[in-house]
Image (cartoon, rainbow, N blue to C red):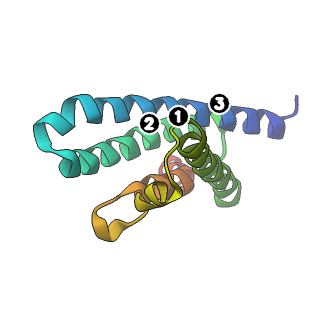
């Protein structure tokens, strides 16, 4: 397997770990934070927690991949963002049987929904991690 293919396989494996991070954080938010803080505050803290943990995982990916240039890291971030949106809508619509309106509501930052921060982190995180690594 050539280096380019290996990086894309590594990127897919990293994204699968992101799914695990998000699921664990979501469970902790619902079980621990919401009873103590209420849904709105727990949502904010949970979203920030996911973003920080995803970024930490992205640091590991960038270190393992050896990527440093902006363009390849943006392509990885774009792949991760598309996969995340597809996963969210597939899970929400097919598995959880949620209406589209409910899924789209998480994108409304004017109503305190911060899901877009996860997508921003997912897209730009590899670039930021590459910048930190020099």
Question: Which labelled disc corresponds to residue 19?
Answer: 1
On the image, the x and y values in percent for residue 60 come to 53, 34
Which one is in front in this view, the residue at disc 3 or the one at disc 1? Answer: 1
Verify CB contact (< 8 Å) between mark 3 and mark 2: no
Q: How many residues crowd mark 1 within 10 Å: few (<14), some (14–19), many (20+)? A: some
Residue lying at the far right in this picture: please name it: 1
Q: Which residue is drawn at 66% across and 45% down?
A: 67
On the rendered structure, is 35 left or right of 11? left
Quickly name the residue at label 2.
22
Verify CB contact (< 8 Å) between mark 1 and mark 2: yes
In the figure, residue 52 lies in which quadrant? Answer: top left
On the rendered structure, is 91 left or right of 55? right
On the rendered structure, is 35 left or right of 114? left
**Circle nearer the N terminus (3, 2):** 3
Q: How many residues crowd mark 2 within 10 Å: few (<14), some (14–19), many (20+)? A: some
Quickly name the residue at label 3.
13
Name the residue nearer the viewer: 71 or 21.
Answer: 21
**Can you say whether 46 is above or below 131 in the image?**
above
Numbered disc 2: secondary structure? helix
């Amino acid at each position: 397997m050539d280096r380019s293919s290996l990086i894309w396989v590594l990127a897919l494996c990293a994204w699968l770990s992101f799914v695990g991070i998000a699921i664990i954080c979501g469970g902790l938010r619902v079980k621990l934070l919401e009873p103590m803080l209420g849904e709105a505050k727990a949502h904010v803290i949970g979203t920030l927690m996911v973003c920080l943990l995803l970024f930490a995982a992205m640091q590991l990916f960038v270190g393992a991949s050896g990527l440093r240039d902006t363009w390849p890291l943006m392509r990885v971030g774009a792949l991760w963002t598309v996969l995340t949106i597809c996963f969210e809508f597939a899970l929400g619509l097919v598995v959880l049987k949620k209406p589209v309106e409910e899924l789209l509501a998480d994108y409304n930052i004017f109503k305190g929904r911060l899901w877009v921060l996860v997508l921003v982190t997912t897209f730009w995180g590899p670039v930021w991690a590459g910048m930190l690594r020099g």
